[in-house]
Amino acid sequence: MMREIEEPKRRQWQPVFKEEWIARWTHPTRPVRDGEVLALDGRRFRVHDMGGGGDCRANAIWVLEDEPRLAFIGDQVFNGVHSYLADGQLAERLANLEKARGFLSGAGTLYPGHGAGGSLELLDTQRRYLEAYRAAIRDLARGRPSLTDAEKNELTSRMQAYLPGAGLTFLIALSADAVAAELARTPKGAER
């Protein structure tokens, strides 16, 4: 999957991040199974395969098994910034937040892919953000698989009001059509 998405991600993000974008990715030398414990630099990490519902089809959460217990939760949570949702997996993201709650309950600090670390409350904050975003898209799209430019501007205004002062505001409109398309494909009442 990494080989498949490396070039499209480079085309998408290098213009944004310029020289900070990684020119060539380093690919894993072996797969890690769900629940496997890896030792890195004398520390033990348990890897939880989350599947889709992040910024691609493969997402993992790494929990430090040693004290102090902490977790690296990647793009399951964006803390204090707007979320990248342009891969259209909002329902899976919400399900992953609930799935993660069970094995993260003993972790002291969670380190998200974007924003400052925090407590388990980060999962609830992210869930509320995703639900607010989904509700705004549902209201603006009215069942259509995309939004007009004017509707994207309105969505941006609503989400900025929901999360004032948050960074990455360009992600609000960027993600709109993917989420609208997901909602348009989902039978009414079948959302998680």
Image (cartoon, rainbow, N blue to C red):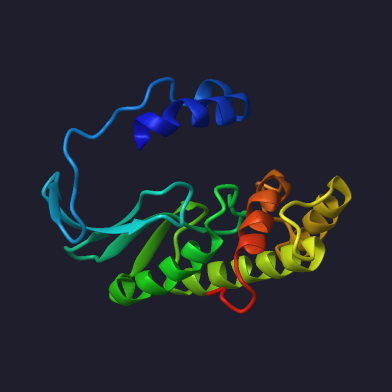
Q: Toward which corner of the image does residue 2 lie, by quadrant?
A: top left
Q: Position of residue 113 (x, y in %)?
A: 45, 50
In the image, is residue 29 above or below residue 176?
above
Please name the residue shown 75% across and 66% down the image: 136
Residue 167 in view of the camera: no
Toward the viewer: 92 or 169?
A: 92
Q: Toward which corner of the image does residue 95 lie, by quadrant?
A: bottom left
Q: Position of residue 48 (x, y in %)?
A: 26, 60
Please name the residue shown 67% across and 61% down the image: 184
Is residue 163 rendered to the left or right of residue 112? right
Point out the image quarter for the N terminus. Answer: top left
In the image, is residue 157 above or below residue 14?
below
Please name the residue shown 78% across and 61% down the image: 141
Q: Position of residue 129 (x, y in %)?
A: 62, 67
In the image, is residue 95 above or below residue 117?
below
Toward the viewer: 178 or 172?
A: 178
Residue 46 in view of the camera: yes
Q: Residue furthest right?
A: 150
Please name the residue shown 57% across and 31% down the image: 13
Is residue 27 rendered to the left or right of residue 144? left
Toward the viewer: 106 or 76?
A: 76
Q: Position of residue 45 (x, y in %)?
A: 19, 56
Is residue 113 rendered to the left or right of residue 188? left
